[in-house]
Amino acid sequence: MSRGQRARLLVGTGLTVAAVLALSTPALAQVPDPAPDASLPGGALITQVLGWLKYAAIAAAVAGLLIGGVATGVGHFGSNYSASSAGRKWVLGGIGAAMIAGLAHTIAITVYNAT
């Protein structure tokens, strides 16, 4: 490392430390008071994201059921038994995904209450 690079590194490190120390005053490091109802800050966003994930899981399960049904029908009527077998696997996967998505709330509450 050349002398100029060391000097730049030293100056950059010094400026970074100075900035951190200047910005870590008690006025800037205060933690906001919790909500009066003791709700989680950002809880509404978390609830909204979980709702989107639940909707996406149900949509994926329905898509799996539809794809499996079409593949099973095409395989059966086209005498392609491997396609029919794959379609049945898609249908079973869609059913399983729908059951897990539907029971996700119950599973989460049970695990939370068990701990």
Image (cartoon, rainbow, N blue to C red):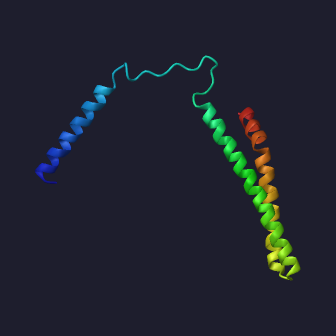
Indicate the position of residue 113 as horizontal and vertical percent values: 74, 32
User: Does residue 24 lie above or below 94 as drawn?
Assistant: above
Residue most extreme to the bottom: 79
Q: Residue at x 21, y 36 (%)?
A: 14
**In the rendered view, does 28 fall on the left or right side of 67?**
left
**In the rendered view, does 55 fall on the left or right side of 85?**
left
Residue most extreme to the left: 3
**In the rendered view, does 110 fall on the left or right side of 3?**
right
Q: Residue at x 57, y 28 (%)?
A: 41
User: Does residue 28 lie above or below 105 as drawn?
Assistant: above
Indicate the position of residue 97 as horizontal and vertical percent values: 77, 55
Q: Quadrant of the C terminus?
A: top right
Quadrant of res 95: bottom right
Quadrant of res 76: bottom right
Quadrant of res 15: top left
Residue most extreme to the top: 36
Q: Residue at x 64, y 41 (%)?
A: 49
Q: Quadrant of the N terminus?
A: bottom left
The total number of labels drawn is 0
Indicate the position of residue 50 as horizontal and vertical percent values: 67, 41
Q: Residue at x 82, y 62 (%)?
A: 92
Q: Nearer the viewer, residue 20 or 35?
A: 35
User: Does residue 75 lie above or below 101 as drawn?
Assistant: below
Indicate the position of residue 32 as horizontal and vertical percent values: 49, 21
